[in-house]
Amino acid sequence: MQIATWNVNSIRTRLDQVIAWLEEVNPDLLCIQETKVSDQLFPLQKLKDKGYEVSFYGQKAYNGVAVISKHPLEDVRKGFAGELANDLEAKQLEEQKRVISVLVEGIRVINVYVPNGSSIKSDKYNYKITWLNCLNRYLKAQAIREEPVCLLGDFNIAPEAKDIHNPDRLTGGIMASEPERKALQSLLDNNLHDVFRVFEQDSNYWSWWDYRSGAWDRDKGWRIDHIYLSNVLITQARSCEIHKKIRGNIQPSDHAPVLVDIAWPPSEENYVEDDFF
């Protein structure tokens, strides 16, 4: 099964690019972020006409997440309320549409768009840390069902120095501060693993290039779009790639898709016990 994540930075602006990529790569599932459209205006019909099942959770002009699938989408859960119905803080965070989860072929796919945070001295930074802590509680609530989990999306965090083009200058700032990284590691809790790093340990692999300052032309990027797999899935992962060339499109998103290939459902021949780590 091939599962992808892509911050498209407006689904209506880049719908043709999304469809073209889907037709070229043919993934089983694509999770998108920053759809930037209210649910009633989501371009559902064009995707349905291509044979896809779609679920979305959006708002006008900002944020928004969606799942585009070749397979039936089961047990769709929108927002933090999907797991934390009685959590007061989770309800307060529901104004921003940033989480959707679905069950696809027995895998719980959780698509997130983590707040950027703006700067470490901003109130938006405090909001980001609060949001990440709420996601932590969300994942713990979800884990009770013991489903295989694929957590993916735009995390707006570079986990390590090698995930930034200039770590000496940028470490400690937004998307690379210690509190952000600690909050991310806490919610992963040794149960979810960065699949890209299973296959590639080196630096100079980016998924986001700022529109400003000629970042794309100079290849000055960050790796902030991630796919995390639970123990049972990480053992079945066959590859994970960043589709960098898409960032070179005319009027591109500032992000590139990230795609994981998982041997799923596992056969007796390729199944590995979950003692990988």
Image: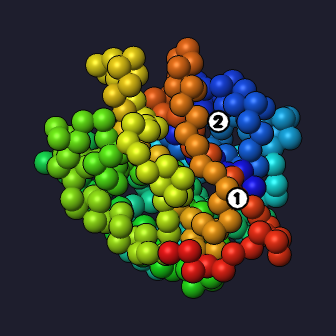
| Residue tagged 1 | 262
Quarter of the figure that contains the N terminus: bottom right
Name the residue nearer the viewer: 129 or 95. Answer: 129
Q: Which residue is situated farthest in the bottom direction here?
A: 144
- Tell me how the rendering is colored: rainbow
Q: Secondary structure at mark 2?
A: helix
Q: x, y (%) of residue 2?
A: 71, 51
Q: Which residue is situated farthest in the top direction here?
A: 250
The correct choice, above or below, for 277 with respect to 252 in the image is below
Rendered residue at 57%/25% (across/down)? 245
Residue type of the residue flagged with mark 2: Leu
Q: CA distance from mark 2 to mark 1?
A: 33 Å
- In the picture provided, is 94 more to the left or to the right than 263? left
| Residue tagged 2 | 41
User: Can residue 62 be seen here?
Assistant: no
Rendered residue at 60%/66% (across/down)? 234
Q: x, y (%) of residue 194?
A: 48, 59
Name the residue nearer the viewer: 79 or 129. Answer: 129
How many numbered dots are placed on residues in this image? 2
Label 2: few (<14), some (14–19) or many (≥20) C-alpha neighbours in 10 Å: few
User: Can residue 251 be seen here?
Assistant: yes
- In the picture provided, is 107 more to the left or to the right than 197? right
Rendered residue at 41%/75% (across/down)? 189
- Residue contact at pointers 2 and 1, CB within 8 angstroms: no
Q: Secondary structure at mark 1?
A: strand
